Image (cartoon, grey):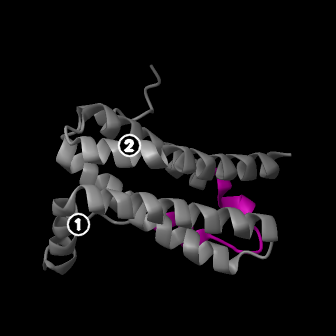
Amino acid sequence: MNATRPNFRRTDAPQLLQETLKHLNDAREFYLQASRSVVDREIRDAFAFSSEAHAALLQSLYTAAPAAQQSQAVDALSSQPSRAVSEFAEVAGMFDGSRPQASASELHALDATLLQRVEALFAIYPDMRVRAALKQHVLSIQRAGDATRRLALRDVA
């Protein structure tokens, strides 16, 4: 087993759901902003697709687990939010729309982490509605991750 790969299956299921929702929301916001700033049409379209894929899964999870949405709202309103700093903040800080390949490896790593979270949630979350939402959208999330992988490979070539 790869020592650097996080083991999300050991995380408490409700906590993992909250972390996944935050990751999805941050990814949606980042890819939406990035799609507006990228010059290359192919990359712009890929980022727009990624934003839409993350938004669709996010909405499905909120529908499947309404308590998760309420918990997110409480975290956002509290004076001591439990939400961690965005995993996308560092990438967003150095992102350059004229050269998105420079951030591709970091984006691909974040997309791979999200897919690992989704797989772990599917395995451990007890609510079948949440698992159905994950199953419905996992291929779109994989496709979005493949786009950043191809972008990272483009930078190497």
Q: Is residue 154 left or right of residue 67?
A: right
Element under disc 1? helix
Labels 1 & 2 near each other (Cβ < 8 A): no
Q: Position of residue 20 (x, y in %)?
A: 34, 53
Q: Which mark is residue 132?
A: none
Q: Is residue 46 above or below residue 14?
A: below
Amino acid type, mark 2: Arg
Q: Residue furthest top?
A: 1
For the point 15% across and 61% down, which residue is it?
67
Q: Position of residue 83 (x, y in %)?
A: 25, 65
Q: Nearer the viewer, mark 1 or mark 2?
A: 1
For the point 80% across and 71% down, which residue is it?
41
Q: Is residue 54 above or below residue 75?
A: above
Find the magenta span and give its range.
87-105
Residue 114 can be seen in this image: no
User: In this figure, which residue is indicated by the disc labeled 1?
Assistant: 69
- Does the segment drawn in magenta span residue 118? no
For the point 47% across and 43% down, which residue is it?
115
User: In this figure, which residue is indicated by the disc labeled 2?
Assistant: 117
Q: Position of residue 149 (x, y in %)?
A: 68, 46
